[in-house]
Amino acid sequence: MASSDDRETAGSNSEAYEPDPEDVDAVLDVTPHDIDTPEEVTFARNVFLPLSTACVNSCDYCAFYDEPGDATLMTPEEVRDTLERGARAGCTEALFSFGTRAETYPGIRDQLDALGYDDTLDYLYDCCVEALDIGILPHTNAGVMTRDELERLGDVNPSMGLMLETTATVKAHDGYATKKPERRLRAIRDAGRADVPYTTGILVGIGETPRDRAESLLAIRDVHREHGHIQEVIVQNVVPNERSDFARPSNETVRETVAMARAALPDEVEVQVPPNLSRDLPSLVRSGAGDLGGVSPLTDDHINPDYDWPAVDRLRAVADEAGAELSERLPVYPRYVDNGWLSTRVEEAVDEARKEF
């Protein structure tokens, strides 16, 4: 387990990103009219497990975290019940999500102690093992982690993720060490060093500029060029919630950003938009979005609880309107399975899941 010093130094100035101005200008010049509509649009069927609602950060635009005293930790019984219900409903992905270093909350620390775990990641590991045993593939979003932690969890996860959010310094991130761009880039790069297939993305509407968005996308591109581990990049607009006064970006702004992402990223890296947060989904598909993320027939979007998942029939209608075919996928993209990125136990679970498609 990493020491607190290791965790604090997980990001360093050496990870700061300096983009080529000509590359940035080229991305900024891209419009939705420059991008071809993808022939296929994919989605995953998931069950969402908010393992803990504690987080060391308190970002106003985030509706997920609870304050100390209110934060929760799912019990082993709740985890097992949710996974079993997901399996019966045909879900292939168990989305485990919680804030960075949830055990810093005393109440969560006490619950973990009672369960016999050193920290939330130790508990998560066993939850992922249970998911694999039940027949659902874990996908973990657990905030900033060290390379050692990523390697350990990679043994029981076919894919994991962390939003870059932005390479810009924005007021929304003031005071939060794990929101520093260099620290998040280091974590994303460490996932590549650990051979973990990875999802990342940017937020649109937290005080960044169009140039900041272009630079953020290019930073992701360059990390992928180093390690080849980025399977998809989310372009996620902020939405109003009870904590935030950030305005939802216009659909045109999101379309332009999706097009920039498609132009900036290698062809094998998919561009994803959240189907419950985005307006006019067909226009986003026509702008280059080839994936609609995970949707759940059972559980809420606990990060954005005011925004319901669309039904699969709605996703099919979106694809039809955009002129694309809709298909279901697993949480890990085929090239990582075929090229031996996964642990033996995870590869066996993926092979079983593939038989159902």
Image (cartoon, helix red, strand yellow):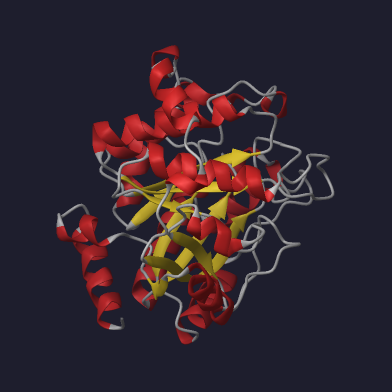
Quadrant position of residue 173: top right
Q: Choose between 29 and 294: the one closer to the eye.
A: 29
Q: Residue at x 44, y 47 (%)?
A: 161
- Taking the view exactly as shown, the residue that stands out farthest to the left is 339
> Eyeballing the image, is 228 above or below 184?
below
Instruction: Give the percent coordinates (x, y) of residue 110.
Output: 65, 48
Q: Residue at x 66, y 55 (%)?
A: 303
> Eyeballing the image, is 295 above or below 340?
below
Quadrant in which the C terminus appears: bottom left
Task: Give the left or right position of residue 138, taking residue 253 as reference.
Answer: left
Q: Residue at x 33, y 60 (%)?
A: 332
- Can residue 142 be seen? no
Q: Residue at x 45, y 34 (%)?
A: 217
Q: Choose between 301 and 271: the one closer to the eye.
A: 271
Task: Give the left or right position of residue 276, taking residue 231 as reference.
Answer: right
> Eyeballing the image, is 85 above or below 165?
below
Quadrant in which the N terminus appears: top left
Instruction: Give the percent coordinates (x, y) of residue 285.
Output: 50, 59
